[in-house]
Amino acid sequence: MTAELLNGRELSDQLKEEMKQEVELLKQKDIHPHLTVILVGDNPASKSYVKGKEKACAVTGISSDLIELPGSVSEEELLQVIENQNNDKHVHGILVQLPLPDHIDEQKVIHAITPLKDVDGFHPINIGKLVNGEETFLPCTPFGILTMLESKNIDIEGKHAVIIGRSNIVGKPMGLLLLERNATVTYCHSRTKNLREMASEADILVVAMGRQHAVDGSYVKEGAVVIDVGINRMDNGKLTGDVDFESAKEKASYITPVPRGVGPMTITMLLKNTIKAAKGLSE
Ligand code: GUN
């Protein structure tokens, strides 16, 4: 079997076109969706992600501000900046780009963003709602993956989903979302024994390990759907995923490429969440 491509770039472009019209309609009602992005320090990868987010906002007519703070900023100053944004009624979404410098407590910062503007879906209140199956902001990467699966009418109910990776941002919420849609979910991680054996049981395999080509075709069951969340830069400067695409695509029914797979969808879901916040739908 040679897999069909799940093209995140193409789907993103389509969704952004739809959102552009939605934003236009909101503006006619005098609602002007606005996202504030806070970037601390000068991590090149973070800078590049933030630039992508700003550009995507501009394309859809969402206004955005970038607040750049030096890596030496104190936790207290950062919390004050967030509080100002919480209280600004023109701001609908607040995103603090992670990771933060070591002297700042990431969880404290996430807690400080009002859940009503938490377009990343990282606040414990929003994660709690996700666990309960209540309406909330969904974390952007898992939300993007779900949207890709739905765009191809891929069955989730009753399927065995294996998630490799247990981060708060991707792995954990991904499993919850699939469970909510009646998948049987297995979480795997760096201490999992027999990873290959576990992965090859999956109907839907989500790989978020952060290790280049950690999973190849021998981990993939014939006909499985393979979702690659990894973004790794190779020695030649090109981007590649956690999955060895060439061997995995021979076994999978659907597979995401890297780049142009999950990455563009993550940003697009941030726009969706910002529009949702502007409409006041998360309450
Ligand atoms: N760093 C890597 N991914 C993300 C994300 O989705 N949101 C934020 N805020 N920071 C990140």
Image: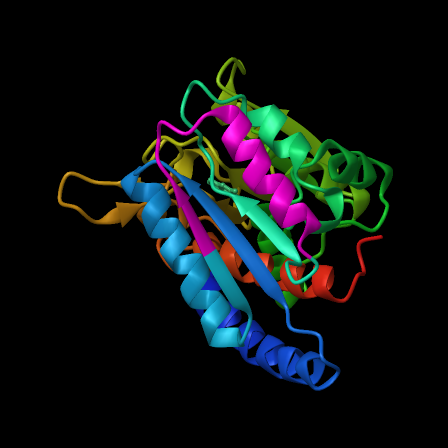
List the single residue furthest toward the left: 236
Q: Nearer the viewer, residue 167 or 278?
A: 278
113 relative position to 258: left or right: right
Asked if residue 146 is positioned above or below residue 63 in the image, the reply reads above
Residue 70 within the segment the image draws in magenta: yes
* Quadrant showing the N terminus: bottom left
For the question of whether residue 220 can be seen, the reply is: yes
Residue 43 within the segment the image draws in magenta: no
Q: In the image, what residue occupies the spot 39% across and 59% down?
A: 52
Residue 94 is situated, as x and y percent measured from the top left of the image, at 60, 49
Q: Quadrant of residue 115?
A: top right
Q: Nearer the viewer, residue 18 or 24?
A: 24
227 relative position to 136: left or right: left
Q: Nearer the viewer, residue 67 or 22?
A: 67
Q: In the image, what residue occupies the spot 69% across and 39% down?
A: 160
Q: Nearer the viewer, residue 209 or 81?
A: 81
**Region of the chain picked out in magenta, as a range:** 66-88
Residue 146 is situated, as x and y percent measured from the top left of the image, at 64, 54
Q: In the image, what residue occupies the spot 13% across and 44% down?
A: 236
For the question of whether residue 170 can be seen, the reply is: no
4 relative position to 34: left or right: left
Give the total of numbered labels. Answer: 0
Residue 49 is situated, as x and y percent measured from the top left of the image, at 39, 50
Asked if residue 141 is positioned above or below residue 161 in the image, the reply reads below
Q: Quadrant of residue 152?
A: bottom right
Residue 83 is situated, as x and y percent measured from the top left of the image, at 64, 40
